Amino acid sequence: MQVLHQLPKIEDKNLIVGNESADDAAVYRLSDDIAVVSTLDFFPPMVDDPYDFGVITAANALSDIYAMGAKPLFATAMVCFPKGLDLDILATIMKGSIDKLKEAGIVIAGGHSIEDKEIKYGLSITGKVAPDKVIKNSSAKAGDILILTKPIGIGVITSAIKSGKLKEEPPLVFAAMRELNRAASGAMVEIGVNACTDVTGFGLLGHASEMAEGAELTVRIYSKDVRIFEDADKFVMKKKNRPRAIESNKVFLGDRVSFSEDVEDAMRMLLFDPQTSGGLLIAVAKEKAERLLSLMATKGVSGFTVGEVVDRREFVVEVF
Ligand code: CO
Ligand code: CO
Ligand code: CO
């Protein structure tokens, strides 16, 4: 978050991960062998069905815990709900997230609600990790291979549904949004990786750039290897289907990214597409990459290579 940089610098020796590196969650050391991990996410509904909204919000919030290589412990809920709106809608949203949290082995332990003009719902998740096992987004190494665990295009597809362009919800996109990043996280913890973040609102390039900046390296994305959800490339060409964040993410990255000429327009936009409950972007040593991919496959995670990490060049992110 931009504003955080204007605030006084936090100094606390037990804060292993604070806000300087734009990581997924805060990590605070309690003792030599245990640290608490904390994260918060909330949004207005990105899908029509209240139950799905609850499920996806939970999967998305848990993802920040999994991206740190941590285990979730419990959740608290944050609710903004309009006066006079049927409370069954809220109950259904919460049912969806309770069911998803249950799959992750945790419960909602509390929360807070206020009246607001539009629905907003979110979860704070508290988790735990051994202090020396934290997987930061800022510790990639030159030579690492980049692996992504879900295709991109979720923002465009959900926008196309909202704009009425897409009549039916594509099952694969919804399955991906509902899917926990737990198995992917378990695989990377088992193999041992250098860095990880989950791909959410800033799009693949935004989150890849944070990884590169944090490590003072350059990230190369091979766009032909980046998997996209079916028809996302078709929908993104129509302005009506484009989430506004595609443009703002692009502006934010500005001249820190370079594209080689043959990268197609649709792909240039999709690489900035904001994801909800997107996949994990993992930087892993080259010699471990194959093992990580095959372990993921045995766990039902369809990870694929999207690029590599190299010494710092002129651009923070290079797209080929
Ligand atoms: Co995140
Ligand atoms: Co988050
Ligand atoms: Co992380």
Image (tube, rainbow, N blue to C red):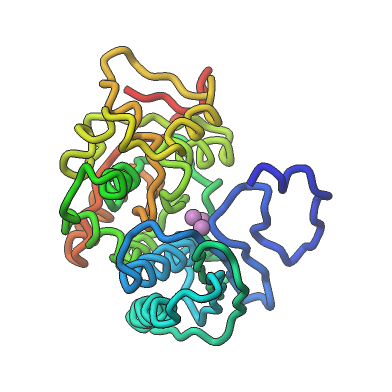
> Residue 144 lies in what quarter of the image?
top left
Vertical order, 284 against 226 (above or below):
below
Determine whether 140 is above or below 19 in the image: above
Up-down relation of residue 256 to residue 134 (above or below): above
What residue is rendered at 49% in x and 84% in y? 108
Q: Position of residue 297 (x, y in %)?
A: 18, 59
Please report the residue visible at 32 percent of the width from the left and 62 percent of the height from the top.
48
Quarter occupied by residue 181: bottom left
**Count of numbered badges drawn on the protein:** 0
Extreme residue toward the front, this view: 84
Q: Looking at this view, is 134 or 162 the one in front?
A: 162
Say left or right for 3 vs 178: right
Residue 233 percent location from the top left of the image: 22, 33
From where the camera sits, is residue 312 visible? no
Q: Is residue 32 above or below residue 14?
A: below
Name the residue rendered at 33%, 59% in the picture.
47
Rendered-image quadrant of the C terminus:
top left
Q: Is residue 89 visible?
A: yes
Q: In this orientation, which residue lies closer to the viewer: 248 or 33?
A: 248
Q: Quadrant of residue 30?
A: bottom right
Image x and y of residue 100, in percent: 35, 77
Residue located 56% across and 63% down the image? 117
The residue at the far top in this view is 261
Residue 307 position within the rendered picture, expressed as x and y whole percent measured from the top left: 33, 35
